[in-house]
Amino acid sequence: MDNSENTIRNLLSKLPLLKNEIQKIIVGQDDVLEEILIALLAGGHCLLEGVPGLAKTLMVRTLSQALDLSFHRIQFTPDLMPTDIIGTEILEEDHTTGKRFFKFNKGPLFANIILADEINRTPPKTQSALLEAMQEFEVTYAGQTYLLEKPFFILATQNPIEQAGTYPLPEAQLDRFLLYIKIDYPSAIEEMEILNSTTGTKKIVIHPIVDAAGIKQLQALVREVSINEVLVRYVSNLVRATRPDDSPVNYVKEWVRWGAGPRAGQALILTAKARALFHGRYAVLMEDLQAMAFPVLRHRILINFKADAENITSDDVTKELIKTTERPKVVL
């Protein structure tokens, strides 16, 4: 075995260790943690939705410690301005020459992992300041472009129950999130463990498992995971079936106002590759696609008023589409 194969095996062996390290602090939430790590491997961003007190902030902070990456938390508020997150120019003076000049002072967006806490509490002008960073991994200020350090990973949170004083995310920005992850309450056993582990004197130390170079290698490796052409066709059929004008399914025409675009298919294939790699495989299976379909399509299928009145969600639409979309005859 050559060095490159040794390096790959060593990196892959760290993925379960990474999850285990985070679970020293975070009790339960196995699926949530896996989906966050899959998004990281795929090089995308996450939107986390959950009621207060479910350790969303703690989860992201613990992830940054286990990854040995720089971390900034930005609390989004109604008075937050774009320059508060991107940065601004300040006037400085060269003491040797006496000349004054403008120097760009980088904002908190310049870190590897960004927690955008309660992102829907800030106005659209500030929300839109994230768009360029999320898509292009760079920011522009006063005509000058500044590259963001990779890996660059945004995890944004929002509260689904307290909507007073919030600004719903525009569809264009929602589409920039690779995954939309919902965090639910812990089970009774998990809640007992949380109560016992967080009310005592024991302090837990998180050790870094993977560094920035390792994450970038894993992200490159994800792209090399193979996927059968029939599965690519299945993804295309599934995504196209979400669009009311093109869908052969009547309930999509009845419940859906707007379907998913091509970016959804790209996200589904990429996250399925990352999931396969996370589980130690070098080829995508149907189970990878079906598992990732929900967080990929959840924010890309816009239901209509009728569906909303009948308590039908985009997850319900995805579930029905998975049932009815013809499965490929050859699945690898």
Image (cartoon, rainbow, N blue to C red):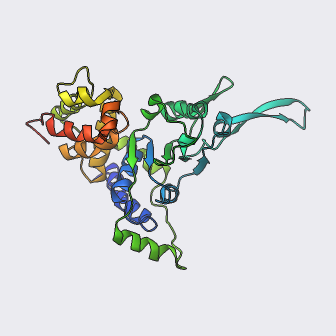
Viewer-proximal residue, 304 or 244?
A: 304
Q: Nearer the viewer, residue 225 or 33?
A: 33
Residue 151 in sight in this render: no
Q: Residue at x 49, y 65 (%)?
A: 207
Seen as rendered, the residue at the extreme bottom is: 201
Specify the quadrant of the image occupied by residue 116. Answer: top right
Image quarter of the C terminus: top left
Count the numbered circles shown: 0
Q: Position of residue 48 (x, y in %)?
A: 44, 48
Q: Residue furthest top?
A: 245
Q: Nearer the viewer, residue 211 or 297?
A: 297
Task: Answer with the quarter of the image where residue 140 lies.
Answer: top right
Residue at image position (40%, 50%) is: 36
Q: Residue at x 40, y 53 (%)?
A: 183
Residue that extends furthest to the left in the rendered view of this protein:
329
Residue 77 x, y percent position in the rendering: 63, 43
User: On screen, 305 above or below 67?
Assistant: above
Position of 74 compared to 234: left or right?
A: right
Residue 300's x, y, as percent? Answer: 36, 33
Q: Is residue 33 visible?
A: yes
Q: Position of residue 75 (x, y in %)?
A: 61, 48
Q: In the displayed structure, does residue 251 sit left or right of residue 118?
A: left
Query: Left or right of 173: which side holds 75?
Result: right
